[in-house]
Image: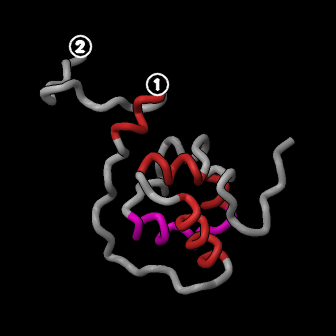
Amino acid sequence: MTAAIPSVPSPDLTVAEALAAWPVLVPVFLHRRMACPGCAMAPFMTLREAAESYGVDADALVADLIAAAAGAAVPAGPFPPPLPHRAEAADDGVGVSAPPPGGAVPSVR
């Protein structure tokens, strides 16, 4: 049994749950240069985790998402390209790690 979706976006909601409940949130992520809409991790990553992985203040992100879900004006595109995830976020052993020192990435065959 799945948990009920709250009436407003909350930091512990997954990105996918938030986007399914409030499609109007997509431009908020894109405006902040977050590639969350369409990301393979969206079903697993909470709004708080997504904010942390981009170095964005989670409380500020959630406040913007709540405002958009309540009908506030959302940013209009075109939007700049998304930012890469912070390298420090990969140090937890989850996700993609940063390239090794020197920038060389070993090839995989």
Q: As shown in the figure, which amino acid type bears the numbered disc 2?
A: Arg
Mark 1 surroundings within 10 Å by alpha-carbon count, few (fewer than 14), some (14 through 19), many (20 or more) = few
Quadrant showing the C terminus: top left
First to last magenta residue range: 21-32
Q: Nearer the viewer, residue 39 or 84?
A: 84
Give the x, y percent position of residue 54: 41, 51
Q: Is residue 103 magenta?
A: no
Q: Left or right: where does residue 1 sit relative to residue 73?
A: right
Q: Quadrant of residue 22?
A: bottom right
Estimate the x, y position of residue 91 in percent, counting from the top left. 41, 29
What amino acid is found at the position of numbered circle 1 in the picture?
Answer: Gly
Tell me the crowding category of disc 2: few under 14, some 14 to 19, or many 20 or more residues within 10 angstroms, Cα based. few
93 or 31, nearer to the observer: 93
Q: Which mark is residue 104?
A: none
Q: Image point 22% across, 24% down: which residue?
A: 100
Among the two numbered marks 2 and 1 on one chain, the one whose residue lies closer to the N terminus? 1
Left or right: where does residue 75 sit relative to residue 106?
Answer: right
Residue drawn at (35%, 29%) of the image: 97
Q: Nearer the viewer, mark 2 or mark 1?
A: 1
Q: Give the main secondary structure of the magenta stretch.
A: helix
Q: Is residue 7 above or below residue 75?
A: above
Depicted 64 relative to depicted 21: above or below: below
Which residue is identified by label 2?
A: 109
Residue occupied by mark 1: 93
